[in-house]
Image (cartoon, grey):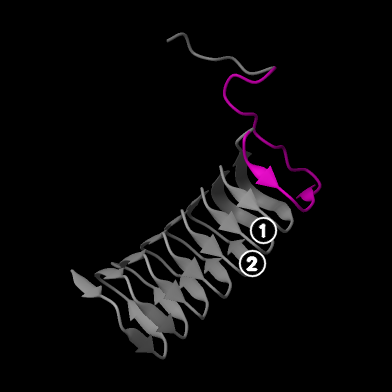
Amino acid sequence: MRRAHGGIIRGGMVVDSDQTMNGSCVGDIAVIEGGTLRLNGACSGDLIMESGKTILRGALAGDATQLAGILTVNGAISGDLLIESGETVVRGAVAGDVQNRGGDLKVYGVIKGDLIEDGGTTWVDPEAKIKGDHIVRDGMERPRAPGSAGEEVAPG
């Protein structure tokens, strides 16, 4: 596992192995096949998830685009989040819009912009905060939270 502690990484970086970043990055980050990124620090660029796994505990100043893989947002994204495919969990905050075009999205945190459902599966926790509009495109059906009206809960 590679670790970037303290310091600043200038220019973009490609993550193709297990990496933890506690410092800051000036530029874009791409996570590709075989990559696992634990971003505890800050990145002033964009995040592009082509594959792999990212756990964002710090701050991303740009946009995040998830083409595949697993993304967990426990920290903050200042820009927009676009999900084409993969699994995404938002427990932290996204200042911009979140658009799901074909992934599996679960929202527990705060979305300050719009939540736009164009495809995939989107589930919003009753305690989550969507400050913008929640837009569901034609033909989309929003899943209900377990235990909500109209949905059976398996006996426990």
Which three-letter amino acid code belongs to the residue tagged 2?
Answer: Asp
Foreground of the two, 149 or 59: 59
Residue 54 spot, x, y in % from top left: 39, 62
Specify the principal SS of the magenta part: loop
| x then y, percent, for residue 92 | 52, 52
Q: Residues within 10 Å of mark 1 (few under 14, many from 20)?
A: many
Q: Quadrant of the rendered structure where residue 24 is?
A: bottom left
Q: Is residue 31 magenta?
A: no
* Residue 23 seen in the current view: yes
Q: Position of residue 83 (x, y in %)?
A: 58, 60
Q: Residue 34, how many percent across, how many down?
A: 28, 67
Q: Secondary structure at mark 2?
A: loop
Q: Quadrant of the C terminus?
A: top left
Task: Please state the extent of the stretch shown in magenta in the rendering.
Answer: 127-149
Residues at marks 1 and 2 touching, judged by CB atoms closer than 8 Å: yes
The residue furthest left is 1
Decide: few, some or many residues near mark 2? Use Cα within 10 Å; few <14, some 14-19, many ≥20.
Answer: many
Of the numbered discs 1 and 2, the one sitting upstream in the chain is 2
| Kind of residue at disc 1 | Gln
List the residue tagged with mark 2. Answer: 80
User: Which mark is on residue 6?
Assistant: none
In the picture of the structure, the residue carrying the numbered disc 1 is 99
- As for residue 129 lying within the magenta part, the answer is yes
Q: Can I make out residue 136 in this image?
A: no
Residue at (34%, 76%) from the top-left corner?
A: 23
User: Rounded to the nearest whole Å, what is the CA distance between mark 1 and mark 2?
Assistant: 8 Å
User: Residue at coordinates 63% horizontally, 39% vertically from top-left?
Assistant: 124
